[in-house]
Amino acid sequence: NSQQWNFTVQKTLGSNLNFEIGYLGSKNTHLGIPDPNINQLPASDLALGSALLAKVANPYFGQIPASSSIGGATVTAQQLLRPYPRFTTVALFRNNIGNSSYEALQAKIEKRLSAGLTFTAAYTFSKLIDDASSVFSNTIFTGPIANTGVADANNLRAERSLSNGDIPQVFSAGWTYQIPRVWKISGWQIAGLVRIQAGDMVTVSQATNANSNMGFGAQRPNLISNPNTPAVRSVAQWFNTAAFVVAPQFTLGNATRNPVRGPGLQDADLMIGKTFRITERMNFEFRAEVFNVSNTTPLNDPNGSFGSAAFGSITSVGNPRVFEFAVKVHF
């Protein structure tokens, strides 16, 4: 299901100058949350603590294959408190339980100057909230990934947070210059693009899920301060890792699904090209392009596995400066 609403105001300001501002909003229900284990122990029972791990007589002994982890004469008490105690896991398959909402304020300005020069700039201020981000990448430089496990299958509201795909501010500007015929190199076109944007959100979960034996798909650490205000930001420690402490067994952890924002992106690209006429019906197009002109290192997202040695560090980067040449024949 999808609901969208938007409005746009356009205004011509002087000669060849156009300004546009608009609002976009949407709500969607989609496939996104991994099939949750609905045979998870009720979270309210975690208050029983270590008593959940005590061995008790198995009322299903002899009815379940002995090779099963719950096929012995005794089982842990927590197994008998589950909704379906005869099974270790019961999952909903492809259930449409992911929800997202998006709001954005967008502005765009376009100016056509004399002598073949066109300039365009756009800015977007937005917020994307969801309870499942499997259709979004944990890094803005790679493709879709699988989402992390659900902390509490019986409380999907706890999954609601800023999405992995939330990029709140994006500015882009582009220009195109058609070299006029009065020049000896007429017919060539030069174009450029600049993009500056904030980073996306990073999922943080404990490397060791102390509640996995009770059917919980993930355990998040406890958050004691703002992790996005480190004293010194570096690839060795992108965020304040001391803001997280271990959530002990029999607790869920109070950190949200995506509490950390990753590095932003700054990129500039250039292109020069020309179309040569061969015959009346055939044209030959040549383009030379360079991406990431300044060779600014695009950082990928930091490690969000709390408890691992790499937690908080950035260990990979995106593409450096890249040159590309292309030819096309149009007929």
Image (tube, rainbow, N blue to C red):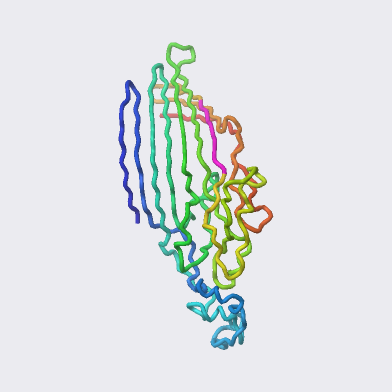
Residue 212 appears left or right of 158: right
Quadrant of the image for the N terminus? bottom left
100 lies left or right of 85: left
**For the magenta stretch, what is the residue range?**
263-271
- Residue at left 56%, top 63%? 253
Numbered-mark total: 0
Where's residue 224, x and y in %?
A: 58, 56
Q: Residue at the spot x=48%, y=70% of the render? A: 91
**Where does residue 41 sit, x and y in percent of width and height?**
52, 74
Q: Residue at (38%, 35%) from the top-left corner? A: 107
274 and 316: which is toward the camera: 316
Q: Could you tell me residue 234's position as x and y percent?
A: 65, 43
Q: Is residue 169 magenta?
A: no
Image location of residue 182, percent across then percent down: 43, 11
Above or below 32: residue 39:
below
Is 271 above or below relative to 67?
Answer: above
Quarter-of-image position of residue 114: top left
Q: Is residue 266 left or right of residue 235?
A: left
Q: Quadrant of the C terminus?
A: top left
User: 321 or 309, which is in the foreground?
Assistant: 309
In the displayed image of the protein, which residue is found farthest to the right? 309
Give the main secondary structure of the magenta stretch.
strand
Q: Is residue 120 above or below residue 307?
A: above
Q: Is residue 267 magenta?
A: yes
Q: Nearer the viewer, residue 16 or 272?
A: 16
Q: Please name the residue shown 48% across and 52% down the image.
A: 163
